[in-house]
């Protein structure tokens, strides 16, 4: 019954296994067996998380074998849009868990070759934005609850 974009996002990708599945998908993993080997997750848990990601349109299945029937899982446009979220989470972990000098994975910007550290910028003017630069504003009308919004998205996808 809540009206919150963060809560709505967590309904789709808030489970830790789901985030690790997405992390690996961005690293090129597409097959069930690859995830199971990399993550050590139980088959039923992995199957349920992948099914949820497909149901929410974050991933889609593509058949790669007829006999036996086998599918790969590909990120959709909706799934690819989660890249900044995962990059920002990785940056937070580097800074506040490992320390930047101990980062387990480094990203370099191909354009300039420098170490990449994500920042938030305003889409309209390009200015880098800090939390203190933002203010909340109420939407013009009362929006949908998380459940209503997810149901509407499901119907629109069908």
Image (cartoon, helix red, strand yellow):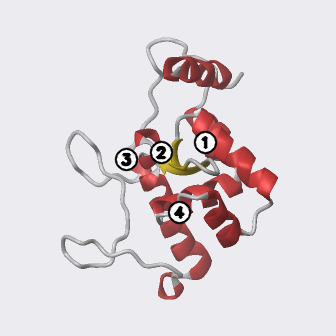
Q: Residue furthest front?
A: 67
Q: Nearer the viewer, mark 3 or mark 2?
A: 2
Tags 3 and 2 touching, CB below 8 Å: no
Label located before the other in sequence (2 or 4): 4
Q: Badge 4, how many Cα within 10 Å: few under 14, some, many 20+?
A: some
What label sits on residue 53 in the rendered view? 1
Which secondary structure lies at badge 2? Answer: helix
Label located before the other in sequence (3 or 2): 2
Label located before the other in sequence (1 or 3): 1
Which is nearer the eye, 108 or 135?
108
Tags 1 and 2 touching, CB below 8 Å: yes
Which residue was labeled with disc 2? 79
Q: Nearer the viewer, mark 4 or mark 3?
A: 4
* Residue 34 picture location, percent across and down: 62, 66
- Residue 10 in sight in this render: no
Which residue was labeled with disc 3? 133
What label sits on residue 29 in the rendered view? 4
* Residue 51 picture location, percent across and down: 67, 41
Q: CA distance from mark 2 to mark 4?
A: 14 Å
Q: CA distance from mark 1 to mark 2?
A: 9 Å
- Relative placement, left or right, of 37 versus 77 is right
- What residue do we see at 37% from left, 47% from top? 133
Label located before the other in sequence (1 or 2): 1
């Amino acid at each position: 019954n809540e009206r919150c974009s963060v809560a709505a996002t967590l309904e789709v990708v808030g489970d830790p296994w789901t985030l690790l599945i997405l992390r690996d998908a961005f690293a090129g993993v597409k097959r069930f067996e690859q995830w199971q080997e990399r993550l050590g997750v139980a088959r039923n848990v992995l199957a349920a998380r992948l099914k949820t990601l497909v149901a929410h349109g974050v991933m889609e299945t593509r058949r790669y074998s007829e006999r036996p029937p086998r599918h790969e899982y590909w990120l959709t446009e909706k799934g690819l849009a989660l890249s900044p979220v995962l990059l920002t989470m990785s940056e937070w972990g580097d800074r506040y868990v490992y320390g930047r000098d101990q980062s387990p994975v480094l990203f370099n910007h191909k354009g300039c070759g420098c170490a990449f550290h994500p920042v938030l910028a305003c889409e309209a003017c390009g200015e880098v934005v800090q939390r203190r630069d933002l203010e909340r504003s109420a939407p013009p009308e009362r929006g949908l609850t998380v459940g209503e919004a997810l149901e509407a998205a499901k119907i629109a996808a069908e």
